[in-house]
Image (tube, rainbow, N blue to C red):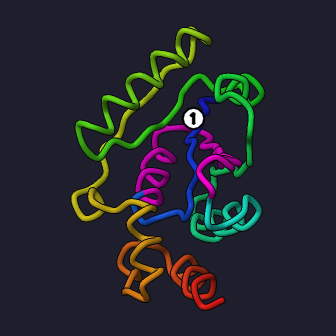
């Protein structure tokens, strides 16, 4: 069984993330969404909220599993018998950073390969950071995130 891990903070999951998972699900037997605890990034949504939003947003993809993690990605990959990591790259700056991560991961776990996918054109400019910023100013975010995420952001920023 070929397993790919798609790690990230997913704060929140966007339509770009959903697109990459759908495409990966067609290429791999099992897609593991590894949702980083990532307190250093100070996420808007806690880990349980992010996992729940991802589950709902991707409920239509049958071969996806969801896990929170706070250890090294290479250790998480070993735990889940994964040989592949999925990373999305939107621009050259993304690629340079992701290439460094891929090489570091391979140095620690030589059999771990990173697969880079570019988003479709309609979601290439979407980032969780920008979505949170727009939502914090009560802007329209429905075209960038699944409906459940848009509602969760509206609720979060009305508190």
Instruction: State how many labels appear.
Output: 1
Residue in view at x 56 percent, y 56 percent: 10
User: In the picture shown, does residue 156 fall above or below 96?
Assistant: below
- The answer to whether 153 appears left or right of 51 in the picture is left
Measured from the top left, where is residue 83 in percent x and y? 59, 22
Q: Residue at x 51, y 16 (%)?
A: 104
The quadrant of the picture occupied by the N terminus is: top right
Q: Residue at x 49, y 51 (%)?
A: 21
In magenta segment, residue 34:
yes
> Does residue 46 lie above or below 94 as drawn?
below
Q: Secondary structure at mark 1?
A: strand
| Residue occupied by mark 1 | 4
In which quadrant of the rendered view does residue 142 lie?
bottom left
Q: Which residues are magenta?
A: 17-42
Task: Decide whether residue 41 is among the magenta residues.
Answer: yes
- In this view of the protein, which residue sits in the foreground, 27 or 137? 137
- Could you say which is closer to the camera, residue 121 or residue 24? 121
Of the 4 image quadrants, the one containing the C terminus is: bottom right
Percent position of residue 23, x then y: 42, 49
In x, y percent, where is residue 80?
73, 31
Q: Quadrant of residue 54?
A: bottom right
Q: Above or below — where is 132 with respect to 13?
A: below
Q: Is residue 88 left or right of residue 31?
A: left
Query: What is the crowding at mark 1: few (fewer than 14 residues within 10 Å), some, or many (at least 20)?
Result: many
Task: Say whether residue 22 is left or right of residue 67.
Answer: left
Q: Nearer the viewer, residue 50 or 114?
A: 50
Residue 124 at x, y = what percent? 27, 56
What residue appears at the point 59 percent right and 37 percent down from the top-left corner?
Answer: 5
């Amino acid at each position: 069984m070929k397993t790919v891990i798609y790690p990230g903070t997913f704060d929140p999951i966007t339509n770009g993330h959903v697109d990459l998972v759908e495409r990966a699900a067609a290429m791999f037997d099992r897609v593991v969404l590894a949702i980083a605890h990532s307190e250093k990034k100070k996420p808007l949504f806690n880990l349980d909220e992010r996992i729940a939003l991802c589950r709902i947003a991707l409920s239509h993809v049958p071969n996806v599993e969801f896990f929170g993690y706070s250890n090294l990605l290479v250790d998480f990959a070993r735990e889940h018998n994964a040989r592949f990591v999925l990373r999305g790259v939107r621009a050259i700056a993304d690629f340079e950073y992701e290439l460094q991560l891929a090489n570091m991961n391979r140095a620690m776990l030589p059999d771990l390969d990173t697969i880079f996918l570019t988003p479709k054109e309609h979601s290439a400019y979407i980032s969780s950071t920008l979505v949170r910023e727009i939502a914090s100013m009560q802007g329209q975010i429905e075209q960038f995130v699944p409906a459940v995420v848009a509602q969760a952001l509206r609720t979060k920023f009305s508190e």
